[in-house]
Protein backbone atom coordinates (compact mmCIF):
# COMPACT_ATOMS: atom_id res chain seq x y z
CA UNK A 1 0.00 0.00 0.00
CA UNK A 2 1.18 3.53 -0.75
CA UNK A 3 2.27 5.57 2.25
CA UNK A 4 -0.39 8.26 1.72
CA UNK A 5 -3.14 5.63 1.36
CA UNK A 6 -1.96 3.85 4.50
CA UNK A 7 -1.96 7.15 6.43
CA UNK A 8 -5.48 7.98 5.21
CA UNK A 9 -6.76 4.57 6.27
CA UNK A 10 -5.45 5.00 9.81
CA UNK A 11 -6.01 8.72 10.48
CA UNK A 12 -9.66 9.76 10.37
CA UNK A 13 -9.09 13.30 11.63
CA UNK A 14 -7.35 14.60 8.47
CA UNK A 15 -8.10 14.34 4.76
CA UNK A 16 -5.89 12.35 2.40
CA UNK A 17 -4.65 15.55 0.75
CA UNK A 18 -3.70 17.02 4.13
CA UNK A 19 -1.86 13.84 5.07
CA UNK A 20 -0.03 13.84 1.72
CA UNK A 21 1.19 17.37 2.43
CA UNK A 22 2.50 16.32 5.82
CA UNK A 23 4.39 13.40 4.26
CA UNK A 24 5.88 15.71 1.62
CA UNK A 25 6.95 18.09 4.40
CA UNK A 26 9.00 15.32 6.03
CA UNK A 27 6.62 14.41 8.85
CA UNK A 28 6.58 10.68 7.99
CA UNK A 29 9.12 7.89 8.33
CA UNK A 30 9.26 4.22 7.39
CA UNK A 31 11.51 2.11 9.60
CA UNK A 32 12.96 5.34 10.96
CA UNK A 33 13.86 6.85 7.56
CA UNK A 34 12.06 9.66 5.67
CA UNK A 35 9.48 8.39 3.21
CA UNK A 36 7.67 9.84 0.18
CA UNK A 37 3.89 9.71 -0.20
CA UNK A 38 4.17 7.28 -3.13
CA UNK A 39 6.52 4.89 -1.34
CA UNK A 40 5.22 1.34 -1.01
CA UNK A 41 4.88 -0.09 2.48
CA UNK A 42 5.37 -3.80 3.09
CA UNK A 43 4.24 -6.13 5.82
CA UNK A 44 6.42 -5.66 8.89
CA UNK A 45 7.36 -2.03 8.11
CA UNK A 46 7.00 0.52 10.89
CA UNK A 47 5.32 3.67 9.58
CA UNK A 48 5.26 6.78 11.75
CA UNK A 49 3.56 10.11 11.11
CA UNK A 50 4.14 13.15 13.29
CA UNK A 51 0.98 15.25 13.38
CA UNK A 52 1.38 18.96 14.09
CA UNK A 53 -0.25 20.33 17.22
CA UNK A 54 -3.70 21.56 16.27
CA UNK A 55 -5.04 24.74 17.84
CA UNK A 56 -8.58 25.87 17.33
CA UNK A 57 -8.69 29.44 16.07
CA UNK A 58 -10.66 32.02 18.03
CA UNK A 59 -13.99 32.82 16.35
CA UNK A 60 -14.12 35.94 14.18
CA UNK A 61 -16.92 38.54 14.20
CA UNK A 62 -19.37 38.00 11.35
CA UNK A 63 -22.16 40.30 10.20
CA UNK A 64 -24.93 37.72 10.60
CA UNK A 65 -28.45 39.04 11.32
CA UNK A 66 -29.76 37.94 14.73
CA UNK A 67 -32.94 38.80 16.61
CA UNK A 68 -32.13 40.73 19.79
CA UNK A 69 -35.03 40.49 22.23
CA UNK A 70 -33.35 42.56 24.96
CA UNK A 71 -29.96 44.16 25.55
CA UNK A 72 -28.22 46.33 28.14
CA UNK A 73 -24.67 46.71 29.47
CA UNK A 74 -24.73 43.32 31.21
CA UNK A 75 -26.74 40.87 29.13
CA UNK A 76 -28.17 40.15 25.70
CA UNK A 77 -31.26 37.99 25.17
CA UNK A 78 -31.33 36.45 21.70
CA UNK A 79 -34.01 34.53 19.82
CA UNK A 80 -31.89 31.90 18.03
CA UNK A 81 -33.24 30.57 14.74
CA UNK A 82 -33.52 26.89 13.93
CA UNK A 83 -30.39 25.61 12.17
CA UNK A 84 -27.90 27.97 13.85
CA UNK A 85 -25.14 26.49 16.03
CA UNK A 86 -24.52 28.37 19.29
CA UNK A 87 -20.70 28.34 19.25
CA UNK A 88 -17.91 27.07 16.96
CA UNK A 89 -17.19 23.35 17.11
CA UNK A 90 -15.78 20.70 14.78
CA UNK A 91 -17.82 20.83 11.60
CA UNK A 92 -19.13 24.32 12.38
CA UNK A 93 -16.12 26.66 12.52
CA UNK A 94 -18.11 29.81 11.73
CA UNK A 95 -21.60 31.11 11.00
CA UNK A 96 -22.52 30.52 14.64
CA UNK A 97 -24.37 32.65 17.17
CA UNK A 98 -21.01 33.50 18.78
CA UNK A 99 -19.69 34.86 15.47
CA UNK A 100 -22.80 37.01 15.14
CA UNK A 101 -22.59 38.24 18.75
CA UNK A 102 -18.92 39.17 18.44
CA UNK A 103 -19.91 41.47 15.57
CA UNK A 104 -23.04 42.85 17.21
CA UNK A 105 -21.44 43.43 20.64
CA UNK A 106 -18.10 44.58 19.15
CA UNK A 107 -16.30 41.87 21.08
CA UNK A 108 -17.74 42.86 24.46
CA UNK A 109 -18.62 39.44 25.83
CA UNK A 110 -17.61 37.59 28.99
CA UNK A 111 -14.49 35.44 28.85
CA UNK A 112 -15.25 32.88 31.55
CA UNK A 113 -15.94 30.09 29.05
CA UNK A 114 -12.81 30.84 27.00
CA UNK A 115 -12.27 32.42 23.61
CA UNK A 116 -14.28 29.78 21.74
CA UNK A 117 -17.47 30.40 23.75
CA UNK A 118 -17.42 34.08 24.77
CA UNK A 119 -20.54 35.12 26.65
CA UNK A 120 -22.19 31.71 26.41
CA UNK A 121 -23.84 30.74 29.71
CA UNK A 122 -26.14 28.03 28.33
CA UNK A 123 -26.88 26.43 24.98
CA UNK A 124 -29.70 25.00 22.93
CA UNK A 125 -29.31 22.50 20.12
CA UNK A 126 -28.67 23.56 16.53
CA UNK A 127 -32.16 22.57 15.40
CA UNK A 128 -33.89 23.93 18.52
CA UNK A 129 -35.02 27.53 18.18
CA UNK A 130 -35.64 30.10 20.88
CA UNK A 131 -34.35 32.26 23.69
CA UNK A 132 -30.86 32.37 25.20
CA UNK A 133 -29.31 34.85 27.59
CA UNK A 134 -25.70 35.86 26.88
CA UNK A 135 -23.37 37.59 29.35
CA UNK A 136 -21.44 40.71 28.36
CA UNK A 137 -19.06 40.67 31.32
CA UNK A 138 -17.65 38.15 33.77
CA UNK A 139 -19.70 39.39 36.74
CA UNK A 140 -22.95 38.91 34.83
CA UNK A 141 -21.75 35.51 33.60
CA UNK A 142 -20.96 34.30 37.13
CA UNK A 143 -24.30 35.51 38.47
CA UNK A 144 -26.27 33.82 35.68
CA UNK A 145 -24.24 30.63 35.94
CA UNK A 146 -25.09 30.43 39.65
CA UNK A 147 -28.80 30.67 38.85
CA UNK A 148 -28.48 27.87 36.32
CA UNK A 149 -26.56 25.79 38.88
CA UNK A 150 -29.38 26.04 41.45
CA UNK A 151 -32.06 25.64 38.74
CA UNK A 152 -33.78 28.95 39.52
CA UNK A 153 -33.98 30.00 35.86
CA UNK A 154 -37.45 29.91 34.29
CA UNK A 155 -37.35 27.94 31.03
CA UNK A 156 -40.44 26.93 29.13
CA UNK A 157 -40.28 25.18 25.79
CA UNK A 158 -43.01 24.28 23.35
CA UNK A 159 -42.87 21.13 21.28
CA UNK A 160 -45.04 18.84 19.20
CA UNK A 161 -44.62 15.17 20.07
CA UNK A 162 -45.82 11.90 18.60
CA UNK A 163 -48.89 10.27 20.13
CA UNK A 164 -51.67 11.33 22.45
CA UNK A 165 -51.96 11.98 26.21
CA UNK A 166 -54.91 11.00 28.37
CA UNK A 167 -53.94 13.46 31.13
CA UNK A 168 -53.65 17.21 30.58
CA UNK A 169 -50.38 17.48 32.47
CA UNK A 170 -47.64 15.41 34.02
CA UNK A 171 -43.90 15.14 34.49
CA UNK A 172 -40.91 12.95 33.73
CA UNK A 173 -38.36 12.49 36.51
CA UNK A 174 -35.58 10.27 35.18
CA UNK A 175 -31.76 10.60 35.21
CA UNK A 176 -30.15 11.60 31.93
CA UNK A 177 -26.58 10.77 30.89
CA UNK A 178 -24.47 9.55 27.98
CA UNK A 179 -25.83 6.56 26.11
CA UNK A 180 -23.88 3.48 27.28
CA UNK A 181 -23.07 2.42 23.69
CA UNK A 182 -23.53 5.44 21.40
CA UNK A 183 -21.55 8.23 23.08
CA UNK A 184 -22.95 10.86 20.73
CA UNK A 185 -26.42 10.33 22.17
CA UNK A 186 -27.96 10.89 25.57
CA UNK A 187 -30.25 8.44 27.31
CA UNK A 188 -32.26 7.80 30.45
CA UNK A 189 -29.71 5.88 32.48
CA UNK A 190 -29.00 5.23 36.16
CA UNK A 191 -25.32 4.60 35.47
CA UNK A 192 -23.63 7.99 35.14
CA UNK A 193 -26.95 9.76 34.69
CA UNK A 194 -27.82 13.01 36.46
CA UNK A 195 -31.13 13.91 38.03
CA UNK A 196 -33.50 15.49 35.50
CA UNK A 197 -37.07 16.74 35.79
CA UNK A 198 -39.36 17.87 32.97
CA UNK A 199 -42.94 19.00 33.57
CA UNK A 200 -45.33 19.05 30.62
CA UNK A 201 -48.77 20.49 29.89
CA UNK A 202 -51.01 19.68 26.94
CA UNK A 203 -51.81 22.73 24.80
CA UNK A 204 -53.61 21.00 21.93
CA UNK A 205 -54.35 17.50 20.66
CA UNK A 206 -54.14 16.49 17.00
CA UNK A 207 -54.40 13.27 15.05
CA UNK A 208 -51.27 11.34 16.03
CA UNK A 209 -49.55 14.33 17.67
CA UNK A 210 -49.79 16.54 20.78
CA UNK A 211 -48.70 20.15 21.27
CA UNK A 212 -46.98 20.50 24.67
CA UNK A 213 -45.51 23.17 26.90
CA UNK A 214 -42.49 21.76 28.78
CA UNK A 215 -40.94 23.40 31.83
CA UNK A 216 -37.43 22.44 32.89
CA UNK A 217 -36.40 22.13 36.51
CA UNK A 218 -32.97 20.90 35.37
CA UNK A 219 -31.05 21.50 32.16
CA UNK A 220 -29.41 18.29 30.97
CA UNK A 221 -28.21 17.87 27.39
CA UNK A 222 -31.14 16.91 25.12
CA UNK A 223 -33.30 16.66 28.25
CA UNK A 224 -36.74 17.25 26.72
CA UNK A 225 -35.95 15.15 23.66
CA UNK A 226 -34.71 12.23 25.77
CA UNK A 227 -37.48 12.45 28.37
CA UNK A 228 -40.27 12.61 25.79
CA UNK A 229 -38.78 9.71 23.84
CA UNK A 230 -38.47 7.69 27.07
CA UNK A 231 -42.24 7.81 27.63
CA UNK A 232 -43.03 6.93 24.02
CA UNK A 233 -43.64 10.49 22.78
CA UNK A 234 -40.53 11.65 20.87
CA UNK A 235 -40.44 15.17 19.48
CA UNK A 236 -41.75 15.42 15.93
CA UNK A 237 -38.90 15.60 13.43
CA UNK A 238 -36.24 14.49 15.92
CA UNK A 239 -33.60 12.67 13.82
CA UNK A 240 -31.86 11.13 16.84
CA UNK A 241 -34.56 10.07 19.29
CA UNK A 242 -37.58 9.98 17.00
CA UNK A 243 -38.91 7.28 14.65
CA UNK A 244 -37.07 6.57 11.40
CA UNK A 245 -40.10 7.61 9.39
CA UNK A 246 -40.38 10.94 11.21
CA UNK A 247 -41.55 14.30 9.89
CA UNK A 248 -38.76 15.01 7.41
CA UNK A 249 -40.22 18.39 6.40
CA UNK A 250 -39.33 19.80 9.84
CA UNK A 251 -35.58 19.28 9.22
CA UNK A 252 -34.96 18.54 12.88
CA UNK A 253 -36.94 18.44 16.10
CA UNK A 254 -40.00 20.65 16.56
CA UNK A 255 -38.80 22.33 19.76
CA UNK A 256 -38.77 26.03 20.68
CA UNK A 257 -37.39 27.73 23.82
CA UNK A 258 -40.34 30.11 24.20
CA UNK A 259 -40.06 31.63 27.66
CA UNK A 260 -36.96 32.60 29.68
CA UNK A 261 -36.82 34.29 33.08
CA UNK A 262 -33.99 35.12 35.47
CA UNK A 263 -32.84 37.58 38.11
CA UNK A 264 -30.98 40.35 36.31
CA UNK A 265 -27.33 40.19 37.43
CA UNK A 266 -26.99 44.00 37.63
CA UNK A 267 -30.37 45.14 39.01
CA UNK A 268 -31.36 42.14 41.10
CA UNK A 269 -34.86 42.29 39.59
CA UNK A 270 -36.60 39.30 38.05
CA UNK A 271 -37.08 39.69 34.29
CA UNK A 272 -38.91 37.43 31.88
CA UNK A 273 -39.01 37.24 28.09
CA UNK A 274 -41.32 35.49 25.63
CA UNK A 275 -40.89 34.75 21.95
CA UNK A 276 -43.50 33.90 19.34
CA UNK A 277 -43.49 30.51 17.68
CA UNK A 278 -41.27 30.52 14.57
CA UNK A 279 -42.61 29.94 11.07
CA UNK A 280 -41.63 26.25 10.87
CA UNK A 281 -43.52 25.53 14.11
CA UNK A 282 -46.66 27.48 13.14
CA UNK A 283 -46.73 25.90 9.68
CA UNK A 284 -46.59 22.43 11.20
CA UNK A 285 -49.43 23.25 13.60
CA UNK A 286 -51.52 24.56 10.70
CA UNK A 287 -50.91 21.31 8.82
CA UNK A 288 -52.02 19.27 11.82
CA UNK A 289 -55.09 21.47 12.28
CA UNK A 290 -56.19 20.81 8.69
CA UNK A 291 -55.99 17.08 9.32
CA UNK A 292 -58.52 17.15 12.17
Image (spheres, rainbow, N blue to C red):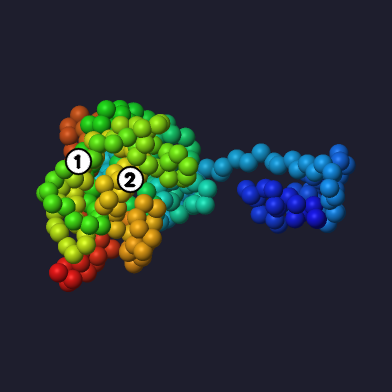
Q: Are there few (<14), some (14-19), or many (20+) residues within 10 Å of tag 2?
A: many
Q: In the rendered view, would you say 149 is above or below 290?
A: above
Q: Specify the quadrant that holds the C terminus.
A: bottom left
Instruction: Provide the secondary structure element on which disc 2 rests.
Output: helix
- The span from disc 2 to disc 1 (Cα, nearest Å) is 13 Å
Location of mark 1 (residue): 171
Q: Secondary structure at mark 1?
A: strand
Q: Quadrant of residue 224?
A: top left
Where is residue 257? Give x, y as percent.
26, 48
Q: Is residue 282 visible?
A: no
Residue pictured at 56% horizontal, 43% vertical: 57
Mark 1 Cα within 10 Å, few/some/many (few <14, many 20+)?
Answer: some
Residue 186 shows in this picture: yes
Query: Foreground: 156 or 81?
Result: 156
Give the x, y percent position of residue 281.
25, 61
For residue 69, above or below residue 175: below
Circle nearer the N terminus (2, 1): 1
Q: Residue at x 67, y 48 (%)?
A: 11
Question: Residue drawn 70% across and 52% down?
Answer: 9
User: Which labelled disc corresponds to residue 137?
Assistant: none
List the single residue furthest toward the bottom: 290
Q: Residue furthest left?
A: 168
Closer to us: 138 or 18: 18
Dot 2 and dot 1 residues touching (CB under 8 Å): no
- Where does the image place residue 66, in percent across and percent down from the top left? 34, 54
Q: Who's the residue at 86% across and 39% down the image?
A: 32
Question: For this view, does 3 lie left or right of residue 58?
Answer: right
Camera-side residue of 271 and 259: 259
Mark 2 — residue? 226
Amino acid sequence: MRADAFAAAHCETLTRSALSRLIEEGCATCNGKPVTKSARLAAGDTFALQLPELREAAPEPQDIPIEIVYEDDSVVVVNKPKGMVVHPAPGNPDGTLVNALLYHCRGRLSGINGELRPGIVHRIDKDTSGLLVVAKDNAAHAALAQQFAVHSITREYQTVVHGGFSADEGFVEKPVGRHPVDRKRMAVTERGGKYAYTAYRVLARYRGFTHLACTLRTGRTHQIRVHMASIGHPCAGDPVYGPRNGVASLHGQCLHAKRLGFVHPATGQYVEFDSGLPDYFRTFLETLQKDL
